[in-house]
Image: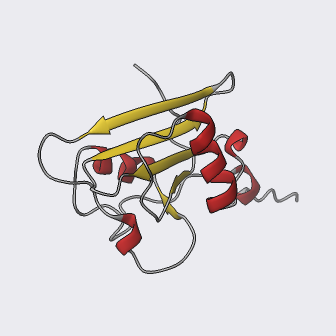
Amino acid sequence: MIGIPRAVRVWVHREPVDMRKSFDTLAAVVRAGMGVDVLEGGVFVFVGRRRHSAKVLYWDGTGHVVLAKRLSKGRFVAPWQRVGEGPLQWTMSELALFLEGSEIVGRMALSPPPWRAEDRQITFR
């Protein structure tokens, strides 16, 4: 079992990606197309043009990990059909629904955003 912490940010590339891309090329897409550093520890989601397959890229601290999934029936959600610009941000719950082939991913907040250390406020009395 590959475990990804719940507090990790999930970034979704809004354009179709050639599913032949692997570690280094997907990392280059993240840097150039999404403006995010792969080594900061986020999870990055890519969907193929026909939406039958998707890839997930993340840095586990020792190297890049690429997970690939091809649906036997149906299609993945098309992130490029969502309103807005730049990469989408999902929670780990939304990522899990996406990988299961759910169609409601990204339409509504399914859980609170992940906790970030910089959001913590310390009050001294």
Of residues 102 and 71, the one nearer the viewer is 71
Left or right: 114 as drawn, with respect to 53? right
Left or right: 78 as drawn, with respect to 117? left
When the figure is inspected, residue 4 is found, relative to residue 89, above or below; the finding is above
Left or right: 67 as drawn, with respect to 38? left
Q: Residue at x 40, y 58 (%)?
A: 111
Q: Position of residue 16 (x, y in %)?
A: 42, 59
As drawn, the residue found furthest toward the right would be 125
Q: Residue at x 24, y 44 (%)?
A: 100
Q: Residue at x 11, y 45 (%)?
A: 73
As drawn, the residue found furthest toward the left would be 73
When the figure is inspected, residue 60 is found, relative to residue 36, above or below; the finding is above
Asked which quadrant contains residue 78, the reply is bottom left
Asked which quadrant contains residue 35, the reply is bottom right
Q: Position of residue 2 (x, y in %)?
A: 45, 23
The number of callouts visible is 0
Q: Residue at x 63, y 36 (%)?
A: 24
In the rendered image, the quadrant that contains the N terminus is top left
In the rendered image, the quadrant that contains the C terminus is bottom right
Q: Position of residue 20 (x, y in %)?
A: 43, 39
